[in-house]
Amino acid sequence: MMLNYDTISDETQSLVDNQQPTAVTDNDEIYAGGFVDNGGEVAIVPATSTFQQPENDFHNVELQSHVQMSDAPNDKWNFTYLVFYLLGTATMTPWNFFITAEDYWMYKFRNATLNDTNPVSEELTPMQKSFSCDLTLTASISGTTFLILNAIYGQKVSLRIRMLGTLCIILVIFIITTAFVEVNTDKWQEQFFLITLLCVVIINISSATMSGGLFGIAGLFPSEYMTAVVSGQALGGIFTALTFIMVLAFGAAPNATAFVFFSIGIGLIFINIVCYAIVERKAFFKYYVEGGDKFKIVYDDPTQSRIVDRGVALEPNVREVFSKIYVHAVTILLLYATTLSVYPSVTILMQSESYGQGKAWNDIYYMPVVNYLFFNSGDYFGRIISGIWEKPRQNVHTVLLMVVFRMIYVPLFLCSNSTQHIFLPTIISSDVAFILMIITFALSNGYITNILLNMVPRCVMQHEKEMASSIMAASLSCGLALGSMITMVFVQML
């Protein structure tokens, strides 16, 4: 058993390293070490100090401190780490498949009276025009709202419901969505439109609750487990991009493409349900989630031969936690607002400098590979690099400055090569320059994300870590929502 002491000054640290607090020695006039509450700060009384207490009342002395006891078991075969990686992919990949099947949605909401199987006709129907915007707004509002609610009230709901319950709901919705692929909805398109948006709301509410819970518990574990979660998110993006490129290469019909996407999503969710059901029974997982490393108010009673644990768990306070990490929260909000302001809505409008010359790379594969595969790969490796070389480790203001400097990418992307330019000039026309911009933009996004999410748990006490990580997830989602609104303005500016 290892004891870690909170709020201990440097002068007394050596005492902690060299001796454990004990009760009293055979000589009751000398207090052999312990804790004294000094104006809210815990101090250790050296073994050579005389404790000033009336002789008759000495055994009634009761000193208290916040003590963190750590005796974590091993993560056998790194199973918990691998499950966190897998759960990270589940936070985004199913939704990515949902929105990537754009041709399918255009086909479903086409003008059915023309008896045209081509999802892209000369004139889009009102539902085709509004679907993308409605999808984004519905997902952003529902997801962000429930991430904020999870950060505040999530600890009042059992972790099993937040994780397994929401994954099961997402699985059911994806099964329903997959079933609709084979259903002819031409005669009731408006009803199907509303059903689809309702499914979007349920998926994003469930995904937000699950994501908030996952980030919260990841904050209770060592930092490499948070790295596993965020790296899993980026790895899911790579997987989605590769699947999209393969489907594009085969030239599959919209219905077949959607069926493949949704089926993969169902399989991924099911695997996550099984793996989480297994990992929640592991001793290593239970130790961190069920309070093995949580601070408690522990009493050192001189009448006993050992420390007495009264089991009074410390409860986190939202205001206190936010006051410690508000700079981190604002930084990650600005980071993702910057990223989403241009990616993917603006960057997908860019084209190769050799577009229209009859080459498959330039005309078909350039943007899917560069915009999706290169970006997600850069984002993934940025998170991996920050897990290996974590700099800066403590100074959040340096990270904030990095985010501000990173905003220079926004005007550069707005002035890149595109046929959509009406108001803005084209400054970046080279394919090489655009690819380098995408890769470095993605690397910085992944690197800074992991730095911030790993930095936050070190800024709060142990019992506040879950709430702090959930607040960061909510701030990240707010950044996504803000960036989605800004990108609508940028698209019109082109």
Image (spheres, rainbow, N blue to C red):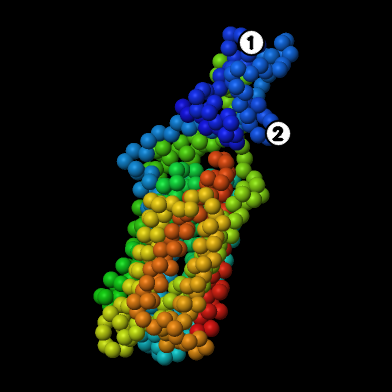
Specify whether residue 257 is in view.
no
In this view, the residue farthest toward the top is 26
Binning the other alpha carbons within 10 Å of mark 2 as few (below 14), some (14 to 19) or many (20 upward) gives: few
Binning the other alpha carbons within 10 Å of mark 1 as few (below 14), some (14 to 19) or many (20 upward) gives: some
The residue shown at (47%, 72%) is 409
417 over 46 or under it: above or below: below
Q: Is residue 18 left or right of residue 27?
A: left
Q: Residue 21, image x and y in percent?
A: 56, 22
Q: Earlier in the sequence, mark 2 or mark 1?
A: 1
The residue shown at (42%, 84%) is 418
Between 184 and 486, which is closer to the camera in this rendering?
486
Q: Residue 344, image x and y in percent?
A: 44, 73
- Residue carrying label 1: 28
441 over 309 or under it: above or below: below
Specify whether residue 244 is in view.
yes
Between 111 and 367, which is closer to the camera in this rendering?
367
Mark seen at residue 243:
none
Q: Residue 447, image x and y in percent?
A: 43, 59
The quadrant in which residue 238 appears is bottom left
Residue type at tag 1: Asp
Between 301 and 423, which is closer to the camera in this rendering?
423
Q: Residue 99, image x and y in percent?
A: 43, 70
Residue type at tag 2: Gly
The quadrant in which residue 429 appears is bottom left
The residue shown at (35%, 69%) is 374
- Residue carrying label 2: 39
Between the residue at mark 2 and the residue at mark 1, the CA separation in whole angstroms equals 26 Å
Which element carries disc 1, helix, strand or loop? loop
Which element carries disc 2, helix, strand or loop? loop
The residue shown at (43%, 34%) is 72
In this view, the residue farthest toward the front is 11
